[in-house]
Amino acid sequence: MSFKTLLTNLPEIIAVILAIVYLLLAVKQNIWCWLAWILSSCLYCYIMYSVGLYMESGLQVFYIVMGIYGWSQWKQSKSDTVFEVFTWTPIQHCFSILLILFLTIASGYLLDQFTQALLPFWDALTTWGAIMATYMVAKKVLENWLYWFAIDLISVFLFASRELYLTAFLFFFYLFIIVIGYRSWNQARLRDV
């Protein structure tokens, strides 16, 4: 890799490193995960916009806001209340999945009709799924890891199609960490029961 290529890819390289730090800290339920999340999201906002994934770029703005929200939720739990991992009911999951699908179809259609967005429906699906999963992480809903697995599996192919190979590899790597995260959070939930 030439120096020029390295400089061109430097934002993606740093974003990938910060994203890995985020996930490893999230598995351990370490509040500093949110800072890594916010910094990575700032870089990815620029990266995704530059490759025509507009929903993914907008998602990064949401991630920054949710990073602040997640930090405040987790910080509050350290101070005065117990903030335990819990699960959603099947009805809550049905509602969230239907909402993701509705928003995917609506925004995918709008992107397809009114922008030059590439892969608008896949971009919308991963975006809306990630929004729901992010909310679940901030609330410490165990099944967030399952949502992330599906989203990240699709994202591997989405990012590879845009030649974001480091990011595609990151999301492939995430699949393994997600399994560890699910097990870790589930053990914490079972201890708290």
Image (cartoon, rainbow, N blue to C red):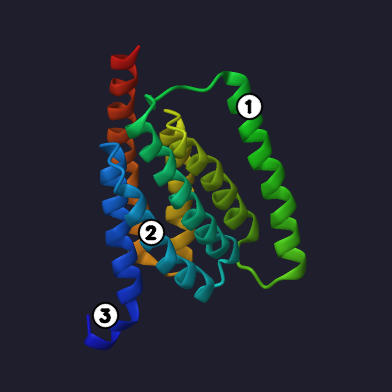
Task: Pick whichever of labels 3 and 1 is earlier in the sequence.
Answer: 3
* Residue at x 32% of width, y 16% of height: 192
- Farthest residue toward the top? 193
Q: Are marks 3 and 1 in contact (CB under 8 Å)?
A: no
Residue 89, above or below 111:
above
- Residue holding disc 2: 168
- Farthest residue toward the front? 80
* Residue at x 44% of width, y 51% of height: 67
Instruction: Name the secondary structure under disc 2.
Output: helix
Q: Position of residue 49 (x, y in %)?
A: 53, 72
In this rendering, would 52 be left or right of 37? right
Of the pair 115 and 33, the residue shown nearer to us: 33
Q: Are marks 1 and 2 in contact (CB under 8 Å)?
A: no
Q: Quadrant of residue 166?
A: bottom left
Residue 107, above or below 42:
above
Q: CA distance from mark 1 to mark 2?
A: 28 Å
At label 2, the amino acid type is Ala
In this rendering, would 28 be left or right of 80? left
Residue 133, above or below 38:
above
Q: Position of residue 76 (x, y in %)?
A: 40, 36
Nearer the viewer's eye, disc 3 or disc 2?
Answer: 3
Of the pair 31 and 54, the residue shown nearer to us: 31
Nearer the viewer's eye, disc 1 or disc 2?
Answer: 1
Of the pair 39 and 78, the residue shown nearer to us: 78
At label 1, the amino acid type is Cys
Visible residue check, residue 176: no
- Residue holding disc 1: 94
Q: Position of residue 64 (x, y in %)?
A: 47, 57
Say which quadrant the N terminus sits in. bottom left
Task: Pick whichever of labels 3 and 2 is earlier in the sequence.
Answer: 3
Residue 6: which disc? 3
